[in-house]
Image (cartoon, rainbow, N blue to C red):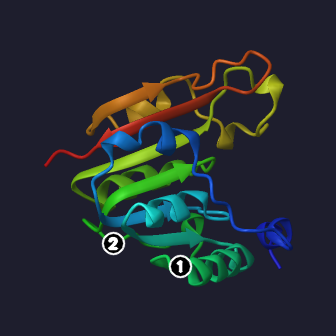
Amino acid sequence: MNKWDLKYQGESAQTEPCFILKQQAAFLPDSGNALDLACGLGGNAVYLAEHGFTVDAMDSSAVALQIIGEFATEKQLKINLIHRDVERGALLPANTYDVIAVSYFLFRPLFPALISTLKPGGLIYYQTFNRLRRDKGGPRSPDFLLEVSELAAQFKELETLFYSEDLFQQMDKPAISAGVFRKPS
């Protein structure tokens, strides 16, 4: 059993999405195909499915996916479960998704694939920790912390609809980079 399976053992499905997805929901189209990448317990997947999307929930944890699957079945939500570890070369098909949500996951080699898998006009909602106030919590390894302005730079070929380097602006908590980006039509 991997560390994520152990973490999610005995948990319940999440019903709250990441802050950026909920706060900036006005940009969402009425329907389409969505991806909740590194979905964990599925807060983004559930939110998107409840808002009319057919959702692919992708994670390396079979335990988390089972929890989401049971919740989706009970609530009759259109959530497809995909057991894949994108850090180990899982491919993302080109021009597939109208919306991609990524929260608290950072694997830099994946940024070009995220752009490629978006349909023209598609949106990426992304939020994760950055190096500001890293002494206040969050990951310690620089592998899991964005540099200041890095998220915007990674998506520079997309239109920036919203961007923040310090989403919550709470000096006693770690800083969060967050953005909503749209692929040109």
SS class, disc 1: strand
Image quadrant where residue 15 sits: bottom right
Image quadrant where residue 133 sits: top right
* Image position of 122 (left or right of 34): left
**Residue under the point 65% across and 72% down:** 60
- Residue 85, given in percent of the width and then of the height, sits at 60, 71
The answer to whether residue 101 is above or below residue 158 is: below
Query: Mark 1 or mark 2, which is nearer the start of the sequence?
Result: 1
In the drawing, what numbered circle is on residue 93?
2
- Residue 14, given in percent of the width and then of the height, sits at 67, 61
| Residue 89 visible in image | no
Disc 2 crowd rating (10 Å Cα; few below 14, some 14-19, many 20+) is few
Q: Which residue is mark 1?
A: 82
**Residues under labels 2 and 1: Cα distance?**
13 Å
Disc 1 crowd rating (10 Å Cα; few below 14, some 14-19, many 20+) is some
**Residue under the point 54% across and 57% down:** 44
